[in-house]
Amino acid sequence: MSGAVRTLTIAGADMARHLRDLAELRIAVFAEFPYLYHGDLAYEQEYLREFAAAPGSALVVAFDGRRVVGAATASPMMAQKEDFRAPFELRGYNTQTMYYFGESVLLAEYRGQGLGHAFFDGREAAARAAGATHATFAAVVRADDHWARPDDYRPLDGFWRRRGYVKVPGLTTQFSWRELGERVESPKTMQYWMGSLAA
C-alpha cells in the first residue's frame, strides 16, 4: 500500500477508462468463495460497458495512489435487463423508484478499512440523487457445508443489516455462470436484499 486509500464516484463517459480495471477486479475477487467465478476478460468488459452505458449509472472507485484496488457499481433498476427486474415486477414492486447495486469488489489486503461503507455511501448518494426510494442487490446462496467454504469465511450478512438492508423473503432469482472446476455454466440461486433510502 502506498498510503491512504481514497474513493471517488464517477458517472457518465468517465467510467469507460476504468472498465478494464473493474473487469480484472471482478475476475480476481469473484474467483473466491462464495462466487467461485471462472471469469473471462472479454465477457467482463462487454458486460460492464452495458452497465456503464445506462443513464444514471455510477461507479465508486477505490484508489491506492493511481492503482485501482476496489470498485462498486450502481444503476437504476429500470436500466437492468428483464431477468433482474422480473422478480420485483412479478411481486408488484415499482422498479422505477429502485436502484440496483451491482458488484462490490475489493482486493483482500484492503478489506477491513471501511471501504465497504464508502462504497455503500457513494452508491446510496447516487441513488438518492436519481430520485430512488429503495436500493437492492443480490447475493449468491451457498450451503453452510459447501466444499469450498473456507474455515475462516465470514458472510457479509451482518454488515449489510447494519447498513439497513434486509433479505426479502422469497425474493430470489437464478443466474448462471461457469464455476471454478465446471466445464459449463450452471444456475446459482441469488437472494435479493433491499433497503430504504429515506433520510
Image: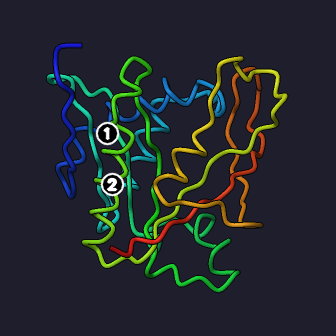
Disc 2 packing (10 Å; few <14; some 14–19; many ≥20): many
What is the quadrant of the N terminus in the image? Answer: top left
Q: Earlier in the sequence, mark 1 or mark 2?
A: 1
Query: Could you tell me residue 94's position as x and y percent?
Result: 53, 84
Query: Could you tell me residue 103's position as x and y percent?
Result: 47, 45
In the image: residue 146, left or right of residue 31: right
Instruction: Please tell me whether residue 182 is drawn above or below residue 167 in the rendered image.
Output: above
Instruction: Please tell me whether residue 99 is drawn above or below residue 74 in the rendered image.
Output: below
Question: Which residue corresponds to the image point at 77% horizontal and 46% vertical from the top-left?
Answer: 187
Residue that mark 2 sits on: 52
Element class at badge 2: helix
In the image: residue 165, left or right of residue 87: left
- Mark 2 and mark 1 in contact (Cβ < 8 Å)? yes
Q: Residue furthest top?
A: 1
In the image: residue 177, left or right of residue 114: right
What is the quadrant of the C terminus in the image? Answer: bottom left
Question: Which residue corresponds to the image point at 60% horizontal and 61% vertical from the top-left?
Answer: 166
In the image: residue 34, left or right of residue 100: right
Residue that mark 1 sits on: 19
